[in-house]
Amino acid sequence: MRRLYALVPAAVALVLAGCVATGPVKSNDEVNAERRQEAEQYYSFGASYYAQRNYDEALANWQKSLEVDSSYYDPYIGIGNVWRKRRDPVQAKEAYTRAVALDPRRAKGYEALGDLYLEMSPIDSSLVDSALVVYEQGLEQDSTLVDLYSGIAQIYITKGATAKADSVYQVALGLFPDDLSVQRLWGEFLYNQKRFAETVEALKPLVERFASDPNINKLREKLALAMAEVKMYKEAIAQLDKIVESDPTNVDALLVQGVILSRQKKYKDALKILDDALAKNPDLAMAHIYIADIEIERGNYGTARAHLKSALEVDPGLTVAYVYQGDIARRQGSEQIGGKALSSLDTGKLQAARSLYDAAKQYYQQGLGDRSYGGYCRSQINYLNQNIELIDKELFIR
């Protein structure tokens, strides 16, 4: 009895000690709030890495964010964006679809999914209609998401119905007259349609109206480019000078200046400005692109390739870098032929030209899924196929 009696106080003490150690029990809301806070931290890390084009770390952090809180919407969009950059539409679609399923009332998932479909439409034309359906679903959830209007307009552009695209932008301009992003999209539309005089007419009063807006510089850049297209070079440079006055660290303005000088074939001055931009920010992929463009025009293909390689190291998904590599290979192939009759060329030159044309095709194929370069790439591939066929016929009869 004494042993049993002695054990009772000890057992009671252990129970009491356990009760003291556990402390107050947290509610489910408190636990969920803590999870979301931790998940948001990982999401923020991922967004920072994504901005630096470090897609491996961005993906790792966003996946960790979902491990902590699988009900967090934003990481799914980020993960989908990474897979788009990596040219993996299957995994991108899965991420976007999960976002839509998680919260059907938020329109961002619809916009991202529609953008993906539209991006893939040069490969599968049926995706154009799929994109339109998704964009319209997004508008049903949130009619204030401006990018949805841009997506629908882009569909009409893809279908060759530019008048309908124009009308969509007019609707958006009417709904959001004071939204600078709408004005920017309208300016982008006019510029991409090569309606440069209209672009100048539309944007010039806007940069005066929104002069105090911190985001006005992007609009000024587009205005400067449009002015350059209609040979208003002095006015274009004046717009860029205003950008630099308001923001001396703005390297984008330097890039546009370089482009404008290049358009005037002032290559030496353009290269100096572009080199200055790279000195300020070595990760400016587009600076390498613009330099490569100049070097291609000057016939310095080796230097151009080096800059394209540097651009892709910064941004592996930069389509224009592949397109320019295709241009180099195509030009070099044509130089092997030199405008002469194929029958007059030796076999070595014909084989070299064919090999270069094949390489050019491979580069252009990288751009088929890009809405900005898909049409150009298709036309170049058709041109190359025709020439390869002629070369093969000549080689066959030898």
Image (spheres, rainbow, N blue to C red):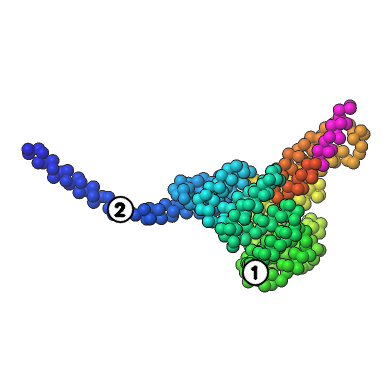
- Looking at the picture, which amino acid does disc 1 mark? Pro
Image coordinates of residue 56 in percent, x first then y, are 56, 45
Image coordinates of residue 365 in percent, x first then y, are 72, 41
The tag on residue 67 is none
The part of the chain drawn in magenta is 383-398
Q: Quadrant of the C terminus?
A: top right
| Cα–Cα span, label 2 and label 1 | 52 Å
Residue lying at the far left in this picture: please name it: 1
* Residue found at x 75% / y 56%: 161
Which residue is disc 2 drawn over?
A: 25
Going from the N terminus, do you reach mark 2 or mark 1 first?
2
Residue 204 at least partly seen: yes
Name the main secondary structure of what is drawn in magenta: helix
Of 355 and 70, nearer the camera is 70
- Looking at the picture, which amino acid does disc 2 mark? Val
Of 216 and 331, nearer the camera is 216
Q: Is 23 positioned to the left or the right of 141 in the image?
A: left
Image coordinates of residue 185 in percent, x first then y, are 67, 61
Please state the total of marks drawn on the protein image. Answer: 2
Can residue 248 be found in the magenta stretch?
Answer: no
Q: Is residue 302 above or below residue 252?
A: above
Which residue is disc 1 drawn over?
A: 177
Q: Is residue 86 above or below residue 346?
A: below
Image coordinates of residue 181 in percent, x first then y, are 64, 63
For disc 2, the neighbor class at 10 Å (few under 14, some 14 to 19, many from 20) is: few
Between circles 2 and 1, the one closer to the viewer is 1
Q: Is residue 182 above or below residue 114?
A: below
Q: Is 380 positioned to the left or the right of 69 in the image?
A: right
* Residue found at x 75% / y 68%: 201
* Residue found at x 81% / y 59%: 264
Q: Quadrant of the N terminus?
A: top left
